[in-house]
Image (spheres, rainbow, N blue to C red):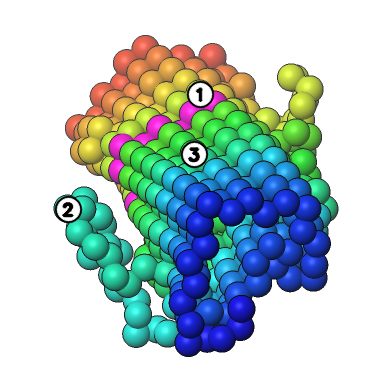
Amino acid sequence: MNESNISVEISNVIFVNGKGLSGASISSGARSLSVDKCGFFNNIAVIGASISQTGGELRIKNSSFRRNAADTGIIDCQYCRLFMENDVLADNVALSSRCVLNFTGVGMLNPENRCEIIDIYSKYKRGDDIDCLDLAMRNCTIEHNRGLRGRFGLSMVSAAGNSLIDNCDFRSNDAAQYAGALSVGGDAVIIANCTIEYNTAIKPGLTPGLWIMGSSNVLIDRCLIADNHYLHLSPGSCSGGIFIASDSNVTMHDCTISNNWAANGGGIYIQPGAILIVDGGEILGNIARSSNRHRDGVGLGGGIYNDGTLILRDYAIIARNMADAGAGIYNTEGGRVRAEGNSYFIGNQAKDKGGAIFNNGSVALECATFADNEAFFGGSIYNLGDLTEADSRFCKNIGLRQNTSFSR
């Protein structure tokens, strides 16, 4: 189907054991392709084991994709608009580069289609139609997919455009290196009410969880990102939960980031030039450790490793994280942290320095609470940089050496 001026609808069809170079089941260049109540099983292709769509619009509803294999993309959608609803992608294998969903939106070709992230979010909260989206995924389940040799475990959403991922579950996906669960990028990306958990990465890379690509604007709303980890920890293992690449602008609203593991940034890793705003929510129980052996390796930033700008506000809680240094937050020389609006640092434990915060850059605290944090040096804060504090509270923090709160 390569007529760009036609529309095609396919429903109640099972595609099994197809083979081809591109689109083993369906290869389309149609203006619009709609797939409803279909099954795609055991199909094999170089690109797009189940569906390959170039240009136009692809709509998939109530369909299942299982046990398919491709070099790149079980679903391949290039320079098109993609809408998925109530779909299951499970037990698929990406043999080489990208993986289950290989997507590039029309925003790459059509900049005037872009709209502001606040406008998309407002329409989403009201339940209005959002006509400027390149990608919309709703109520989908993505689980037990594998990337064998390539870098990406689940999806590559590389659009200079607009995306909405709503009420989707990303569970138990495995990547050879980058992004065991999900990779996103674009001018306006909203990830809402999603669960990203139990995903893994084999080799040191960016994250087994969520990778936010550089120069992106992303809002993460009421999501759970938990229990993501590397199978083999090493000093190059960055971020168990979220990796935020340079020059990105990210806001998290009422999210829980918990029980993720990595060498640096057990929960979150922020690169230089990136900005993360944490509005409420919890960052808890994450671990930074650079070796699978319990007592080996040095881990920095159990909750957050910050080399960019981090803003905490609206009762954000950082609790029960562990690391060698900076169990709650490890702030580099180039990092800036501002905690305001009653942020809480509770029960974080560093084996060496900075139970709550290790600061080598700039930290400004206003109305923050530090309680029951512990480290060998600096039970609450180990400070080697610029630190300002106003109206903050320190209670029962333990530093085995030097002052229990501040150390230089």
Q: Which residue is mark 1?
A: 285
| Pick the front one: 280 or 156 | 156
Residue 299: mark in rendering: none
- Between label 2 and label 1, give the one nearer the viewer: 2
Which residue is painted at 58% across and 80% down in the image? Answer: 29
Tell me if 370 is positioned left or right of 159 in this view: left
Q: Which residue is mark 3?
A: 169
Q: Which residue is mark 2?
A: 126
In the rendered structure, are the residues bearing label 3 and label 2 in contact, judged by CB atoms less than 8 Å apart?
no
Q: Is residue 41 above or below residue 117?
A: above
Type of the residue with mark 2: Arg
Which residue is painted at 27% across and 65% down in the image? Answer: 130
Q: CA distance from mark 3 to mark 1?
A: 21 Å
| Residue 267 can be seen in this image | no
Q: Is residue 154 above or below residue 358?
A: below
Type of the residue with mark 3: Asp
The outermost residue toward the left is 126
| Pick the front one: 19 or 182 | 19
Tell me if 125 is positioned left or right of 8 in this view: left
Q: CA distance from mark 3 to mark 2?
A: 22 Å
Image quadrant holding the N terminus, namely bottom right
> What element does badge 1 sit on?
loop
Q: Locate residue 83, reporting x and y percent.
A: 44, 61
Lower sequence index among marks 3 and 2? 2
